[in-house]
Every structure is written in structure tokens, then in C-alpha cells.
């Protein structure tokens, strides 16, 4: 996706805690002019994970990546698409557990019609069911103590994921 996207990409997933490699690829794509949007959960069934995810919002916004939080229920969907050319749908979350330790299954579809439909669905979700997060309304930006808590949650979850996926990364 990162190598081929030229215009836009949209990523929707539940536990968005990308590792360094994924973040580097996101930043490079955004720097090259690709419009990137991520649809993330506004509500969470695991509060610590949401705080950890929100810790990354400043980084995403600094890299011109648009953030949308789904408001209606707990988001569980995992889908991505780029340039109305390719779509993936499945169980993969953007984190080290999905990347290295869990058995995940995604269906990749290289088809303009399917990619256009997926893009249309995600555009509708953004318009009707999401709140856009900006530098001005970022839940982490204004509260020093909340920012410390988010950093703690991010470090704790990231370190825990790294410990539990270390063995799998070696294979």
C-alpha cells in the first residue's frame, strides 16, 4: 500500500499502535503528497489502549495525517484502501500483536470497483459517524496530566507488546 499509493489512502482499525517501520512508511507517504486518513475508535472497551493510541495523535497530526474517531459504538472494523485501486478487509489491527504474534487473515482485493465501493463506505462513515481530531480539539493536547497518562499507557502497552512478540519477531 505505501509503495503504490499516489493520491490517497484510508485506514480503519481498532487498535492502532503502529510500530516504527509502519510509522516511517506513513510519514514518507504523507510527505510525498499522499492524503492519509485514519478512522479510529472514539469509544473503547479497553481504556488503556485508547489512551495509548491517543498518545500518537500529536505525531499523526504533525505528519499531516487526518484522524477521525468513530462515535456510534466501539469500532471493530479493519479495512484499508488506496487510490481507488486496492482494498484490504480482515482481522489485522495495526500493532505488533497482529503483525508478529496473532493469526490474522485479510483479503486483499485489487479491483477498481471494489476499491471505489470501500472508499465510498469509509467516506460515508467519516461524514456521518466520525468526529475529526485536529490540533485544536486533540484530547491530549491541552491537559498535561492526561498527556503523561497517555505516555504511560503507550509505553506500558508498547513494551508489553514488544516483550510478548520478541520471540515471533526473531523467526
Image (cartoon, helix red, strand yellow):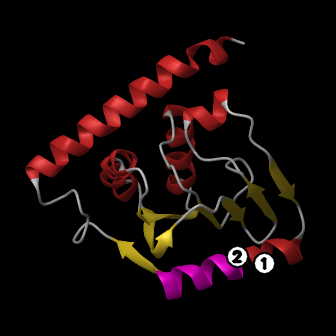
Residue labelled with disc 2: 119
Mark 2, secondary structure of its residue: helix
The image quadrant of residue 112 is bottom right
**Residue under the point 74% across and 41% down:** 104
Quick check: 101 above or below 82? above
| Magenta span of residues | 120-129
* Dominant SS type (magenta): helix
**Residue under the point 43% across and 56% down:** 45
Q: Which label is found at residue 132?
A: none
Quick check: 103 above or below 72? above
Q: Which label is found at residue 116?
A: 1
Residue 148 x %, y %: 16, 41
**Residue under the point 48% across and 73% down:** 73
Query: On the picture, is 83 further left or further right than 152?
Result: right
Residue 51 x %, y %: 31, 49
Disc 2 to disc 1: CB gap under 8 Å: yes
Mark 1, secondary structure of its residue: helix
Amino acid at each position: 500500500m505505501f509503495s503504490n499509493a499516489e493520491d490517497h489512502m484510508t485506514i480503519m482499525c481498532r487498535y492502532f499502535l503502529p510500530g516504527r517501520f509502519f510509522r516511517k512508511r506513513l510519514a514518507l507517504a504523507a510527505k510525498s503528497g499522499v492524503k492519509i486518513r485514519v478512522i479510529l475508535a472514539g469509544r473503547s472497551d479497553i481504556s488503556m489502549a485508547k489512551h495509548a493510541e491517543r498518545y500518537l495523535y500529536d505525531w499523526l497530526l504533525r505528519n499531516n495525517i487526518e484522524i477521525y474517531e468513530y462515535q456510534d459504538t466501539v469500532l471493530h472494523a479493519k479495512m484499508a484502501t488506496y487510490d481507488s485501486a486496492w482494498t484490504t478487509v480482515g482481522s489485522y489491527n495495526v500493532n505488533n500483536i497482529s503483525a508478529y504474534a496473532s493469526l490474522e487473515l485479510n483479503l486483499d482485493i485489487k479491483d477498481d470497483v471494489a476499491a471505489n465501493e470501500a472508499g465510498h463506505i469509509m467516506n460515508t462513515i467519516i461524514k456521518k459517524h466520525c468526529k475529526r481530531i485536529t490540533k485544536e480539539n486533540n484530547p491530549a493536547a491541552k491537559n498535561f496530566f492526561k498527556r503523561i497518562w497517555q505516555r504511560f499507557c503507550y509505553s506500558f502497552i508498547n513494551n508489553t507488546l514488544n516483550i510478548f512478540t520478541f520471540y515471533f519477531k526473531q523467526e
